[in-house]
Image: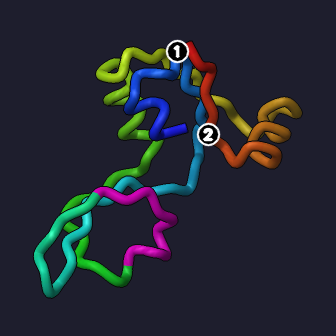
């Protein structure tokens, strides 16, 4: 879904409002190469973390750059709960 968003193929991004994923810029300790990764907060240990923020927050701030609308879904409703369980909390409607 994120690759499709970056390619401009997503018209509407649908995201669980409490998605437990962090968007982090990581630096490899030996090579100093930086990369962006989408990880759970527990998986940030291997490389040096240069910058991080909750992926939901980043998507809310940057979805327009990729030409997409965003819809936040709560797991409090039955439909939202099924979305989180079935799809993992992030999806998109293609153009």
> Is residue 79 rendered magenta in the image?
no
- Dividing the picture into quadrants, the one containing residue 95 is top right
Image height check: is 24 above or below 27?
above
Extreme residue toward the bottom, this view = 30
Q: Residue 57: image x %, image y %?
A: 40, 40
Extreme residue toward the left, this view = 32
- Nearest-to-viewer mark from 2 and 1: 1
Residue interval drawn in magenta:
36-44
Q: Image point 45% across, 17% down: which residue?
A: 68
Q: Residue 52: image x %, image y %?
A: 30, 58
All told, the count of numbered labels is: 2
Q: Image point 70% across, 48% down: which residue?
A: 88
Q: Residue 11: image x %, image y %?
A: 52, 15
| Neighbour tally class for label 1: few under 14, some 14-19, many 20 plus, Cα within 10 Å | some
Of 78 and 2, the residue lying toward us: 2
Q: In this view, does 22 lie to the left or right of 74?
A: left
Of 76 and 16, the residue lying toward us: 16
Q: Image point 74% across, 43% down: which residue?
A: 87
Q: Residue 90 carries which label?
A: 2
SS at circle 1: strand
Which residue in the protein does label 1 denote? 11
CA gap between label 2 and label 1 equals: 14 Å
Q: Image point 43% across, 57% down: which residue?
A: 38
């Amino acid at each position: 879904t994120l690759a499709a968003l970056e390619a401009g193929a997503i018209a509407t991004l649908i995201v669980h409002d409490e998605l437990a994923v962090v968007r982090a810029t990581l630096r490899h300790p030996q090579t100093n190469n930086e990369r962006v990764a989408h990880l759970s907060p527990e998986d940030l240990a291997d490389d040096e973390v240069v910058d991080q923020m909750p992926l939901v927050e980043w998507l809310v701030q940057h979805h327009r750059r990729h030409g997409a609308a965003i819809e936040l879904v709560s797991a409090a409703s039955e439909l939202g709960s099924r979305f989180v369980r079935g799809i993992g909390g992030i999806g998109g409607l293609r153009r």
